[in-house]
Amino acid sequence: MSALTDNEYINVGEISGVFGVKGWVKVFSFTQPRENILSYSPWFLKKGNTIKAFKRTAGRRQGKLVVAELEGVNDRDTAAALSGWEILIKKTQLPATAKDEYYWVDLIGLAVENLEGVKLGHVKSLFETGANDVLVVKQGNTERLIPFIQPQTVRQVDLEKGLISVDWDAEF
């Protein structure tokens, strides 16, 4: 497999343990809903500098868990050896977004500036609230929490320029 680049892959979960004796794995999924992780195959499992591609042959929601069967993983010991491995997929495996919709992974690292042209920092992460998503924007020791509400707060996202324009006071 070629070298892993941050721009090509995203982390969608982790193998959290084994399920049964036939080689199925328990999956901690970062997707919403959790079982959406089963929409993707192959999975690129990564631990340290090692990366292995696996075709996902079966899977299902099992209570609060997601469980999956991977091609070539046929027993409990082989499955146990994968515990703790990250589950990556290629960005090209994601469905296309609609206009003004973005994957969080595409927003992380973008510069943020307000309508007056004041640079507020870069998107460090995002999180959900009951009402909307929130950008965590960091500049030096300053961290701002900016609601991701279009077009009220977030006026424009330009992925090509790597810039998010926001209606936000630089002093807040």
Image (cartoon, rainbow, N blue to C red):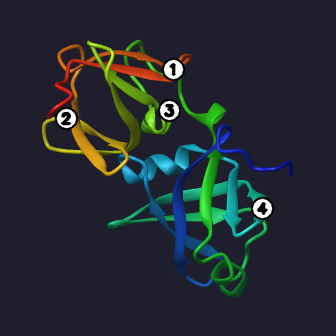
Q: Nearer the viewer, mark 2 or mark 4?
A: 2
**Label 2 close to label 4 by CB (< 8 Å):** no
- Give the mark, 2 or 4, whose residue is nearer the N terminus: 4
Residue 144 is situated, as x and y percent measured from the top left of the image, at 24, 41
Q: Which element carries disc 2, helix, strand or loop?
A: loop
How far apart are the two marked residues, 2 and 1, measured between alpha carbons?
21 Å
Q: Secondary structure at mark 4?
A: strand
Which one is earlier in the sequence, the residue at label 1 or at label 3?
3
Residue in the foreground of this view, choosing between 39 and 87: 87
| Residue type, mark 2 in image | Asn
Q: Give whichever of discs 2 and 3 has the lower sequence position.
A: 3
Residue sitting at 70 percent across and 82 percent down? Answer: 75
- Disc 1 crowd, CA 10 A, few/some/many (<14, 14-19, 20+): few
Within 10 angstroms of label 2, few (less than 14), some, or many (20 or more) residues?
A: few
Q: Quadrant of residue 56?
A: bottom right
Image height of 161 relative to 111, above or below: above
Q: Which residue is mark 1?
A: 159
Please name the residue that numbered disc 2 is placed on.
132
The spot of residue 86 in percent (x, y) is 60, 63
Task: Identify the disc placed on residue 52.
Answer: 4
| Distance Cα–Cα, label 1 vs label 3 | 8 Å
| Image quadrant where residue 107 sits | top left
Q: Are marks 1 and 3 in contact (CB under 8 Å)?
A: yes
Q: Secondary structure at mark 3?
A: helix
Q: Amino acid type of disc 4? A: Lys
Q: Nearer the viewer, mark 2 or mark 1?
A: 1
Left or right relative to 102: residue 113: left
Q: Residue at x 47, y 58 (%)?
A: 60
- Label 1: state its secondary structure: loop
